Amino acid sequence: MNYTSTRGTVAVNETYALLHGLAEDGGLYVPSLFPTNCLTYNDVKDKNYQEVAAVVLSKLFPCFSEAHLKEMINSAYSDANFSTRDIAPLHSLLEKVSVLELFHGRTQAFKDMALSLFPYLLVAAKEAEGEKKEVLILTATSGDTGKAALEGFKDVPGTHIQVFYPTDGVSPMQAEQMQKQEGDNVNVTAIHGNFDDAQQFLKRLFVDKDTAEEVAAKGVMFSSANSINIGRLAPQVVYYVNAYAELVAQGAIHEDEAFNVVVPTGNFGNILAAYYAKKMGIPIGKLICASNQNNVLTDFFESGTYDMNRPFYTTISPSMDILESSNFERFLYYISGEDSERTAGWMKDLKSTGKLTVNEEEFNRVKANFAGAYVDDEETKAIIEQVYNSYGYVMDPHTAVAMGAYMKELEKHPEDGARHTIIASTAHPFKFPTAICEALDIKVGDTPYESLDNISAVTGVAFPKQLEALKSKPLRFTKAIDKENMKQEILDFVDTFSK
Ligand SMILES: *Cc1c(COP(=O)(O)O)cnc(C)c1O
């Protein structure tokens, strides 16, 4: 199977797309020929997570042999990397509502679901492409991608990783996880700016030929671990397929009965993965895109216009504080009927005016699959409290945003109540101690660890072992730079390992 750019028609191998991340024309790689309706219940019945992953990924990366895929999958989704054998268990909250827990990996966020496997895919792609250069992974993070990518690439031979995170945009726990990162091939730098600034800079750098040549002369090439890389997206399709198999096995749905999915959304990668699962044949009904006060997507799903000309808010669900949602481009490509010219036109509009509008026919396609709703910080805390008081379950703020969006959509469409719904839970609540303390009226401690001890004592939720171990580790990366200096920071890092 070949991959093409959302903005062009040139096809490349799967391994080229994996290795390079972003297409040369600035577009995102998508399958040239989407494997539509290739999955049925029989394909995934009675299979464990790893086996489901092999089935799904063989459709998206047929270039890898089955044995090779299985080997990579088993290394990624191992007992060492995940705290539960189920990998992504479903927690039954209400008769018709299950929480899909995606936070049992090494860094307590759903980014681990893809970033545990991605380094294996990248190294395999590098070998297949005969690429001898050292790969420098450049990553912008709104909080969780950075840590998950660092853990994934830590000490992987032939690779190095540079992470940028916004000084004010991440929770203290998220910052500490990155500042205390171990490994000899890693660099972490805070920037004065927000996630959009960091992501935009990197997207420009990826298509900057001069810089590419400059580092190539030193035996180095850039790649991306952000969800612009198809190697991030594909592994995320797996947990929706696995959840479907699980719902059928539990008797919660029949094998051809539709279920809805609610996804707390930032860069649109997670929800796009659910859409891919649907296109591949999984009976997903409505996809509900949940946002915080940065509700550019909610407005799009209501009006057909995506308008970034609006204030940027720092919220208690920081991993969703994004206005320029990268994977939205892939979504637009499908909405246009896989028309790369149309997509390129929209991206031009977005660049020049900060907004884009789809036509009526396209908007009808959007509405046939998607709905959007948003929840502000006060509502988010109220939901955390309500869910805890009613069901004894502690949700992180991002998951609570999804729960809130579900409740708002249900008010508008009470008939949805008859359908089983999956709430994607994207982080462990312990990554956001202050928000949880405030929501549950628990004393905020002097340090994040003290707050977590207090939360643990009140709710009985156990400390994830990686967060507990973090407490005694030394700080390694505390530098903060202006965003204008990102390029120099990268070049300086290159000089530490290049020839
Ligand atoms: C990254 C992240 C999101 C947003 O996911 P996207 O794929 O970027 O839409 C939501 N919640 C948490 C906790 C995250 O880390």
Image (cartoon, rainbow, N blue to C red):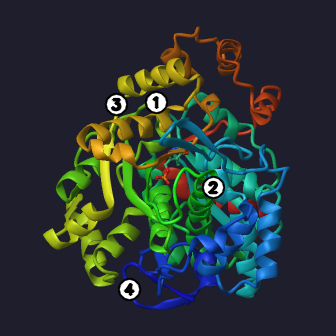
- Name the residue nearer the viewer: 394 or 327: 394
Which label was assigned to residue 376? 3
SS label for mark 2? helix
Q: Where in the figure is residue 177, as x and y percent of width and height?
A: 69, 37
Q: Tags 2 and 1 in contact by the CB under 8 Å rule?
A: no
SS label for mark 4? loop
Q: Quadrant of residue 173?
A: top right
Q: Closer to the camera: disc 2 or disc 3?
A: 2
- Residue 302 is left or right of residue 38, and the answer is left
Nearer the N terminus, badge 3 or badge 1?
1
Quarter that holds the C terminus: bottom right
Rounded to the nearest angstrom, the CA distance separating label 3 from label 1 is 9 Å
Q: Tags 4 and 2 in contact by the CB under 8 Å rule?
A: no
Give the residue displayed 20% in from the left and 51% down from the top.
302
Task: Name the amino acid, label 2.
Answer: Glu
Q: Tags 3 and 1 in contact by the CB under 8 Å rule?
A: no
- Name the residue nearer the viewer: 418 or 293: 418
Give the residue displayed 25% in from the left and 79% down from the top.
342
> Quick one: label 2, few (<14), some, or many (20+) residues within 10 Å?
many
Task: Name the amino acid, label 3.
Answer: Asp
Nearer the N terminus, badge 2 or badge 3?
2
Residue with the mark numbered 1: 316
